[in-house]
Image (spheres, rainbow, N blue to C red):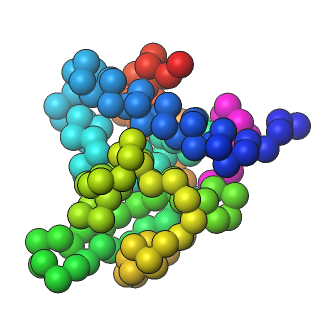
Amino acid sequence: MRKKLSAEELHNVAIDFRTAIMSAKRAGRFSWQDRMHNFPGGCCDDACDLLAHYLNVNYGIESVQRNGVYRDDNEYNTTNHVWLLVYGEIIIDLTVSQLPFGVDIPNGLYFGTENLHYRNIEDTRTQTNYNITNDARLLNDYSIIMEYMP
């Protein structure tokens, strides 16, 4: 049985994973037709599925997705959003920087417990992560990201 990662270790893994995605993106490794090409915009569910797979395969960590709708006073700031929930309470949001409340968050990811911003996301629901082994596109994205992991 693998040891449970500490919060600090898990945070570092999340930073490494997001950095690997950004490195692959900067290197032009994602096809312009692939949603990861626009990371962090418009691919929060794919990013969650990819990170969830990585955590499960490498650390035996199970996670779930939280999905909801972000709204604020600006009608153009309404969007669906997805983030991971690990150990039942730790949010890992690789794509928070695409939301107005996340633009100044260090490393472009939110790591922590539920705060006011996440409590204000509407219509939230929890679901299991998609099994990326059933999707050639996501498996290809995963392989690309793995080339940039430390």
Residue 54, percent from left and from top: 58, 35
Above-or-below relation of 47 to 112: above
For the point 69% across and 58% down, which residue is it? Answer: 87
Q: In this orientation, which residue lies closer to the viewer: 147 or 89? A: 89
Quadrant in which residue 12 is drawn:
top right
Quadrant in which residue 13 is drawn:
top right
Q: Is residue 52 one of those drawn in magenta?
A: no
Residue 75, percent from left and from top: 12, 78
Above-or-below relation of 38 to 79: above
Q: Which residues are magenta?
A: 57-63
Query: Is residue 137 visible to the viewer in this orientation of the structure?
Result: yes
For the point 64% across and 65% down, which residue is it? Answer: 89
For the point 25% across and 18% down, which residue is it? Answer: 27
Judged left or right of residue 123, residue 80 is: left
For the point 50% across and 22% down, which residue is it? Answer: 149
Q: In this orientation, which residue lies closer to the viewer: 136 or 57? A: 57
